[in-house]
Amino acid sequence: MRCVIVVILLLAVSSVGLAATIAVPGDYSSVLAAVDAAVAGDSVLVGPGTWSDIDTRTVVINGIPFSMTGFAVMSGNPTRGLVRVQLDIPAEAEGPWRVAVFDVRGRRVRELLAGPVRPGQHNIAWDLRDNGGLRAAPGMYFMSAAGPGHAATRRIVVVR
């Protein structure tokens, strides 16, 4: 009996030990390299910073496909001027998309895109103005992109 319990515990401990946590930066210098290196059960832990190496691809997690939509801030962040982002829409996500800017309270400050969008790379700019044409106050904002089966948000810090 004691031998059976020890074997079961060893099997349980060894199966838990197979999963790895991959750190970016640390183990890998890019998010894509870490995702490519990960195997079933692994976790990819991404540190704070600006990551612009994410492209459009599908990652299968537990048999469920998740598409990673590239949504990268291409201009400086924090910013005093125009914010440029690049949105990469995969073929399966053609359809209605919304790109909007929200303040920290969740209020929509500006709608930048609303309507059908074709697959491919799209450059979107925010001139730091709200829907009424007034300049946004300094602070933290969130630019959100959402379309068929996809969503991504990026933090934008506006300074004077």
Image (cartoon, rainbow, N blue to C red):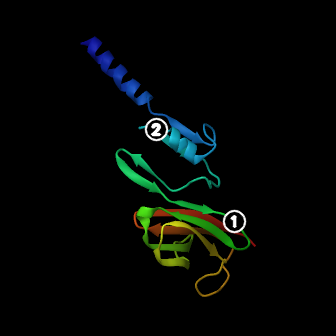
Task: Give x and y (percent) for residue 128.
Answer: 66, 77
Query: Dot 2 lies on which element?
Result: loop
Identity, as a three-letter code, of the amino acid under mark 2: Asp
**Residue, disc 2:** 42
Extreme residue toward the left, this view: 1
Relative vertical location of residue 132 with respect to residue 15 in this rendering, above or below: below
> Could you tell which of marks 1 and 2 lies nearer the N-terminus?
2
Give the residue type at disc 1. Answer: Ser
- Identity of the residue drawn at 47% across and 68% down: 146
Classify residue 149 as left or right of residue 155.
left
Q: Is residue 91 above or below residue 33?
A: below
8 shown above or below 132: above
Disc 2 packing (10 Å; few <14; some 14–19; many ≥20): some
The image quadrant where one finds the C terminus is: bottom right
The image position of residue 91, as x and y in percent, is 44, 63
Give residue 71's position: percent from left, percent from top: 56, 62
**Pointer 1 residue:** 75
